[in-house]
Amino acid sequence: MSRKILVVGAGQSGLQLALGLQSHGYEVTLMSNRTADEIRSGRVMSTQCMFHTSLQHERDLQLNFWETQAPKIEGLGVSVAAPGSHDPGPTQRAIDWVGKLDGIAQSVDQRVKMAGWMETFAQRGGQLVIHGAAVSDLDYFARTYDLVLVSAGKGELVSMFGRDASRSPYTEPQRALAVAYVHGLGPRPEHPDFEAVRCNIVPGVGELFVMPTLTTSGRADILFWEGVPGGPVDAFKGVKDPSEHLALTLELMEKFLPWEYARATKVELTDANGTLAGRYAPTVRNPIGRLPSGGAVLGVADVVVANDPITGQGSNSASKCAAAYLSSIVEHGDKPFDEEWMQSTFDRYWDTAQHVTKWTNTMLQAPPEHVLNLLGAAGQLQPAADRFANGFNDPADFENFFYEPAKTEAYLASLTQ
């Protein structure tokens, strides 16, 4: 008899898990609060840029449907505005370089991907339930399934998972987020021949990320501001009109990042739903959720580990979590999915997720002197630029050269001998 598994939430992790379990012969039910068509025609959900390891998890399950259409991202660049240079004159760049990725990165608008994956799940015989689940629903369903996985990262279901204070240093949002999907952005003149994610840092003000993507209307770029709360980029609250949102995005680029604004003078929104704004506090939660009747459910991806998007890890972490959980489920055979198993399954994912959390929480702080030295040196030492860029694929490597001044100095010294 095949085991019955309920997956609640149809994002990167929920769908990847549902499709993976389906391919292993499990009887899978997927609950989504929206149909595929509603997702496809709805508002943008994220700024997903996925790096090699995460993309490989999709390839392993043969879910890389858009790989040939999405822009192939070969680099990751960092620009740092010289402190105070935007007031009153134009901003200068103190640091500006691009590192090359060992494996390509890609971004597919989640409206395209989730809608496509959801249709694939149904075509392959999966049970798709369109229903926004409440805790009381799960209490009812949990009795009829061998395992319930909760991958809906927003809403009341998250309240079942208690905050892990020892792993959550912040109680408030650390950035105000504002996203715009655009057509018509020009290339960065420093590398017109290849695509790169550009990370622009304005000390004390915030960050702007520019990333090539594939959206519902083809090739596009994402302009993504992360503003320090209360600062000049924390200006999108209450902006409802998409064209006003874009105008504000560009106005802030012109003031703080004129080199990025220079290639954005002809942009227009990809569609009326191509903007997003909000904020949330980065939080790690306990992985086991308690139901009123005493049953237990297992949290997935950003239900249990939600980081600020400053390091671009959300969709990557979701993919890695789904891959780890899939292995744990398959290896467990027909033994019961008890709480001990749930905890060890999460612990296996935390082995990689802890590095993401540490790095992300570090990047939300003002960079210490040794990190500024590292970023500055990467402009002259290409191996340092490349290594930093590839840390986005494998954040565990930052332990070796990023956090401790002595390790940073030793690494830089090894490049100049």
Image (cartoon, rainbow, N blue to C red):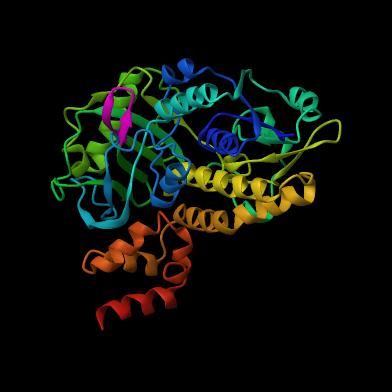
* Residue appearing at x 30%, y 40% in the figure: 211
Q: Name the one closer to the observer, 365 or 351.
A: 351
> In the displayed structure, would residue 216 be above or below residue 213?
above
The picture places residue 85, in percent across and down from the top left corner, at 23, 51
Place residue 416 in its image quadrant: bottom left
Place residue 90 in its image quadrant: top left
**Number of callouts:** 0
Position of 119 with respect to 305 (left or right) is left
In which quadrant of the rendered image does the N terminus lie?
top right
Position of 14 with respect to 267 (left or right) is right
In which quadrant of the rendered image does the C terminus lie?
bottom left
Magenta residue check for 219: yes
Instruction: Label the magenta part by its dominant secondary structure.
Output: strand
Q: Residue furthest right?
A: 293
> In the displayed structure, would residue 133 be above or below residue 95?
above
The picture places residue 321, in percent across and down from the top left corner, at 56, 46
Q: Is residue 84 visible?
A: yes
The picture places residue 20, in percent across and down from the top left corner, at 55, 38
Position of 298 with respect to 180 (left or right) is right
> In the displayed structure, would residue 69 be above or below residue 84?
above
* Residue appearing at x 56%, y 36% in the figure: 23
Q: Can residue 310 be seen in this view?
A: no
Place residue 44 in its image quadrant: top left
Bounds of the magenta segment: 213-222
Magenta residue check for 396: no
* Residue appearing at x 38%, y 19% in the figure: 273
Q: Residue furthest front?
A: 1
The picture places residue 12, in percent across and down from the top left corner, at 50, 36
* Residue appearing at x 35%, y 52% in the figure: 203
Q: Which residue lies furthest to the bottom in this view?
A: 417
